[in-house]
Amino acid sequence: MKKIAIYGQSYSLTAEKEVQLLLKVLEEQQVVIFFEKQFYTLLNQHNVLAKKYSTFEHFNDLNSSFNLMFTIGGDGTILRAITYIRDLNIPILGINIGRMGFLASIKKDTIQESIACVVNGDYTIQERSLLSIRTEPEIQALKELNFALNEITIARKNTTSMIGVQTHLNKEYLNNYWADGLIIATPTGSTGYSLSCNGPVILPASKSLIITPIAPHNLNARPMVIPDDTSIELAVDAREKEFLISLDSRIVTVPRGTKIFIKKAAFTVKSMLPNNQSFLQTLRSKLLWGEDIRNETPFSTNSHNK
């Protein structure tokens, strides 16, 4: 590593300790460090940084000379960070000070060990696919940032009534989902919103997308896994004049009658994974797979008889 970027969204005492530890380890490796400008200002306001650093504040301030971007936060921080990286092929590595941390997988107590893996080349790069969207008529807010790493969601707005989402795959009619909304998720997004709506978990390298209805009224509508080269066309029928489209954490209000076209984006995000981590290990720890509280202590016949 010679040149890295650091991105975060908020300040906390935990973040302060992790930033200082990260800087200590990186500076021992004589790495050139750039901070995202707003995060840099926030850290300076709390006297976290002992010296000045260069900053970036837009996608145009970064380029392929950067070897890596560290994020300080949770998965939401990484979702915001990709709006800076886009198609620059800068690998991203998240230090988790949030909650779940499927994407930001580096635990606070393994920062030094994980960075040592990165410095020594002891890591793998996961290519994570994204979704892209276009609309007819064109929505200005979706013109530049028209991609999502986790999911693109169609949802109702200002109503308790369901919406109908007429869905075509490769121009062939699939279904009209009567529901609170519809999620189109990537493999990365399979552990996000889609999972909470009973969608399946699929591995990051899977060549698939997931269609997951949100609280569907037609009860036989189930999540569906489709090839990731499928083109998806959606049209919304709703009582309200507007509905919502969300791209990860970015939400746009869209007029009824807008046609939506979704497909796999032309670029990927490169997620760096030190070899002391694995996706399956993360699944087990975050979703508590295999945990059985009944067997935490040996069964005692004597205590049972008492």
Image (cartoon, grey):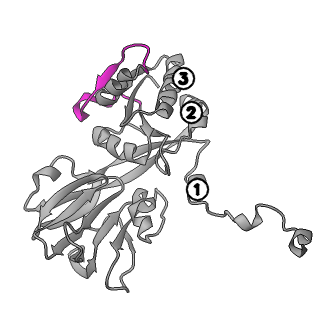
Does residue 14 sit above or below 162 in this rendering?
above
Measuring from the top left, give residue 198's x and y in whole percent.
44, 72
Give how far apart the Cα atoms at labels 3 and 2 are.
Answer: 9 Å
Q: Amino acid at mark 2?
A: Ile
N-term-proximal mark, 2 vs 1? 2
State yes or no: discs 3 and 1 in contact (Cβ < 8 Å): no
Does residue 133 sit above or below 108 in this rendering?
below
N-term-proximal mark, 3 vs 1? 3
Q: Give the labeled residue for mark 3.
A: 25
Q: Give the labeled residue for mark 1.
A: 280
Of residue 149 and residue 255, the one placed in the foreground of this image is: 255
Span of residues in magenta? 48-68
Give how far apart the Cα atoms at labels 2 and 1 are.
Answer: 20 Å
Q: Give the labeled residue for mark 2.
A: 111
Name the residue at the left extreme.
Answer: 137
- Magenta stretch: includes residue 61: yes
State yes or no: discs 3 and 2 in contact (Cβ < 8 Å): yes
